Image (cartoon, grey):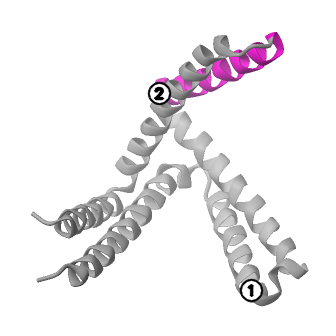
Amino acid sequence: MKHWFLLLLVGVLSIGAGVLALANPFAATLTAELLAGYSFLAIGILIFISAFQDRSWGGRIWAALLGILITVFGYNLVAHPLQGMLQLTVIIASLMIAIGVARLLIAFTPLAAGARLIMVISGTLSIALAVMIFSSFPWSGAVVLGVFLAVELISNGVSLIIVALDRRKAEPV
């Protein structure tokens, strides 16, 4: 079996998972929220453990506090998944506003001279999506993460299929 075929297979599976997530965005949101919760739990515990490897007491204290904070956040997401979905939705929508404003500010600086229009469109779109999320909150919390996950899975699948087909063409016959 060639390597390109594995990429193709993973791409097709990713698209299939994305379509399933779009078909039931609430289940996908719950899955994404629990995955984030368990990830935060693991990361928090590892940060707390690594705090004892630091040489300075100040570094140890800050790392231990950060580890505890992240662990508590992860535990809260796992223990209260519906509340966690709302929390993550607010965090994501808030970040989208911040990113949108930053893109708009950058669009009118010399940094974006050649890409000013796309930066304005991208920034405006981020802010508009965040406003849509907040305008239908808390109901949007039940589906936003699932829809984002679905779009990411489908996008990932399409790109993997394109890479696989490109690699297949490059292989000698």
Residue 153 lies, with reference to residue 34, above or below; the image says: below
Residue 112 lies, with reference to residue 22, above or below; the image says: below
Residue 58 lies, with reference to residue 93, above or below; the image says: above
Residue at 61% across, 40% down: 87
109 is within the stretch colored magenta: no
Q: In the figure, residue 12 lies in which quadrant?
A: bottom left
Residue 20 left/right relative to 30: left
Q: Which residue does the numbered mark 1 point to in the structure image?
A: 115
> Could you say whether the residue bearing mark 2 is in a helix, strand or loop?
helix
Residue 108 left/right relative to 21: right
Which range of residues does the magenta coloring cover?
57-79
- Asked whether 89 or 117 is in front, the reply is 117
Picture coordinates of residue 42, whole percent (x, y): 49, 25
Picture coordinates of residue 162, whole percent (x, y): 32, 78
Q: In the figure, residue 24 lies in which quadrant?
A: bottom left
Amino acid under disc 1: Ala
Amino acid under disc 2: Val
60 is within the stretch colored magenta: yes
Residue at 45% across, 30% down: 38
Q: In the figure, residue 113 lies in which quadrant?
A: bottom right
Residue 155 lies, with reference to residue 133, above or below; the image says: below
